[in-house]
Image: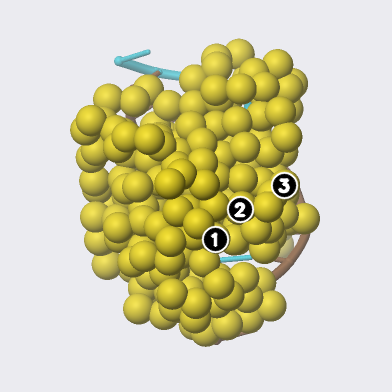
Chain colours: A yellow, B brown, C cyan
Amino acid sequence: MSGSADLRAVLAGPVLEVAPRLLGAVVRHGDVAVRLTEVEAYDGANDPGSHAYRGETARNGVMFGPPGHLYVYFTYGMHFCANVVCGPEGRASAVLLRAGEVVDGLALARERRGTPRDRDLARGPARLCSALGVDRTHDGADLVSGPVTVTLADQAPERVSTGPRVGLRGAPDRPWRFWVTGETTVSPYRPAKSRHVRTDPRFEESPGQG
DNA sequence: CGAGTGATGCGCT
DNA sequence: GCGCATCACTCGT
């Protein structure tokens, strides 16, 4: 019933069905475990927001492989983010693990994160990876054999909300972000707009050379 | 709580 | 070169 066969079967399904089913699931790496409260769906080559949109490369190769593996990427020069590859092999769809609640290994998670508030330990995709100690070395890890594992929830959360994905540019809004309604560990929404102010060059003073 | 911004490396065009 | 599936910090309310 429960167990690896069930997990593999679930993850082989369509990404829009897999994503909400991952809410409440527990991701474990060693002593630290996180119960997922927020995820986002990315649908391979059909999805302009997906890393797989422009085809297979060295970085996103794991996405094009079989479901049930972890796709980890490095971004913004300092952060890791983790996805669960799902759907049929070659579809390159995946679910981004956006946020969760630390349910085991609290001391180690606090040590890694150094955050005063426990609710912020895994609140955000990069924070979640940091709390779990997941990095590029876990790219491609089999989620059944480990070292990073996923255990599905016995029951689906009572209420699930959906909305637009966070931080994406160049993708039409699709309500492919799923979270457990009312959870305080869900990451704060950040609009997908430019966060660096661009001054019109005509009115900008040249910084270095007058 | 919200808005604003610097830090920082790598994948891709 | 440019742009990023981000975060931590600051300042103001």
Residue A150 picture location, percent across and down: 55, 45
Residue reaching furthest to the front: A1
Residue shown at 32% from the left, 34% from the top: A155
Residue shown at 55% from the left, 32% from the top: A34
For this view, does A61 lie left or right of residue A41? right
Residue shown at 27% from the left, 52% from the top: A164
**What residue did someone put label 1 on?**
A68
Secondary structure, mark 2, is loop
Residue A134 picture location, percent across and down: 69, 44
Share a chain, discs 1 and 3?
yes
Residue A107 seen in render: yes
Residue A100 picture location, percent across and down: 48, 33
The quadrant holding residue B11 is bottom right
Residue A22 picture location, percent across and down: 40, 46
For this view, does A140 lie left or right of residue A185? right
Above or below — where is A207 with respect to A22? Answer: below
Above or below — where is A18 with respect to B12? Answer: above
Secondary structure, mark 1, is loop
Above or below — where is A110 with respect to A126? Answer: above
Say which of A125 and A210 sits in front. A125
User: Label 3 is placed on what type of residue?
Assistant: Pro
**What residue did someone put label 3 on?**
A147
Q: Residues within 10 Å of mark 2 (few under 14, many from 20)?
A: many
The quadrant holding residue A113 is top right
Q: Which mark is residue A143?
A: 2
User: Label 2 is placed on what type of residue?
Assistant: Leu
Say which of A11 and C12 sits in front. A11
Mark 2 / mark 1, whichever is N-terminal: 1
- Marks 2/1 in contact by CB < 8 Å: the verdict is yes
